[in-house]
Image (tube, grey):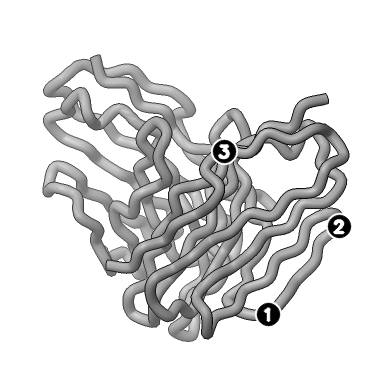
């Protein structure tokens, strides 16, 4: 099956810093989503981004489908950004399950 | 517009027992997927229901079964519980509609502890 790897596995930053999280996947995908899992376990949708670039406030994401990677940028980090960030992919129509990456645990220090 | 809801929020069972978890999808959605998330790992796909039928299944034993009702809500049943079934169980809803899925939205999850 498809492999989804995220880096770095852990990231500790001071409040106000910027960060880049990476997601590599081993096969072509038709769906890629970024999620933030808060300390209570809730998965919060950040982006649906199978290709191209999107921005939402301090967050932006870019997926280069031909090179099989996606990047999540967080600018001016806040303590509420702490948690685990997952990317998840779906490989093709008829096989519509999300395969999650290994996650990046982000800790923002005040 | 209510999002995805799940019940109960927490559950404690003993080995060998059976458990039923419930999920109501986001308004307007017709497809429900279930995921298991063990501590420190990413969610793993269990199965997906559409039009009251299991549409796709992940690598989980037959002890895991489900159901979808006409109002699109869903149940996940786990029989003969094992210690290793302790996890956060997540429900996701989406709109399959014309044949493609886009964004899946997740509920808050049910934390199951098997003693």
The residue identified by callout 2 is A57
Q: Which residue is drawn at 87% across and 39% down?
A: A16
Label 2: few (<14), some (14–19) or many (≥20) C-alpha neighbours in 10 Å? few
Query: Does residue B29 sit above or below B91 in this rendering?
Result: below
In this rendering, position of residue B67 left or right of residue A71: left
Q: Which of B87 and B99 is in front in this view?
A: B87
The residue identified by callout 3 is A10
Distance from Cα at disc 3 to Cα at disc 2: 23 Å
The residue identified by callout 1 is A52
In this rendering, position of residue A39 left or right of residue B67: right
- Quarter containing the N terminus of chain B: bottom right
Q: Nearer the viewer, residue B114 or A66?
A: A66
Q: Residue at x 57, y 63 (%)?
A: A33
Does label 1 or label 3 sit earlier along the sequence?
3
Q: Tell me the element at label 1.
A: strand
Does label 3 or label 2 sit earlier along the sequence?
3
- Residue B22 can be seen in this image: no
Instruction: Choose top left, top right, bottom left or bottom right for residue A22.
Output: bottom right
């Amino acid at each position: 099956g498809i492999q989804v790897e995220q880096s770095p596995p852990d990231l500790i930053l001071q409040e106000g810093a910027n960060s880049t999280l990476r997601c590599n996947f081993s096969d072509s995908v038709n769906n890629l989503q970024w999620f933030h899992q808060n300390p209570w376990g809730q998965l919060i949708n950040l982006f649906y981004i199978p290709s191209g670039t999107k921005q939402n406030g301090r967050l932006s994401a870019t997926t280069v489908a031909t090179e099989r990677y996606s990047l999540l940028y967080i600018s001016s980090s806040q303590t509420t950004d702490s948690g685990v960030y997952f990317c998840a992919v779906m490989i093709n129509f008829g096989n519509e399950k999300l395969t999650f990456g290994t996650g990046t645990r982000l800790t923002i220090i005040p | 517009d209510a999002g995805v809801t799940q019940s109960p929020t927490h559950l404690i069972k003993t080995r060998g027992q059976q458990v039923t978890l419930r999920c109501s999808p986001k308004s307007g959605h017709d497809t429900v997927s279930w995921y298991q998330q063990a501590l420190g790992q990413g969610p793993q796909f269990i199965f997906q229901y559409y039009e009251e039928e299991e549409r796709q299944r992940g690598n989980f034993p037959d002890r895991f079964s489900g159901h979808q009702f006409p109002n699109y809500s869903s149940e996940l049943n786990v029989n003969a519980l094992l210690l290793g079934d302790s996890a956060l169980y997540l429900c996701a809803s989406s709109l399959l509609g014309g044949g493609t899925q886009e964004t899946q939205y997740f509920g808050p999850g049910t934390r199951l502890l098997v003693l």
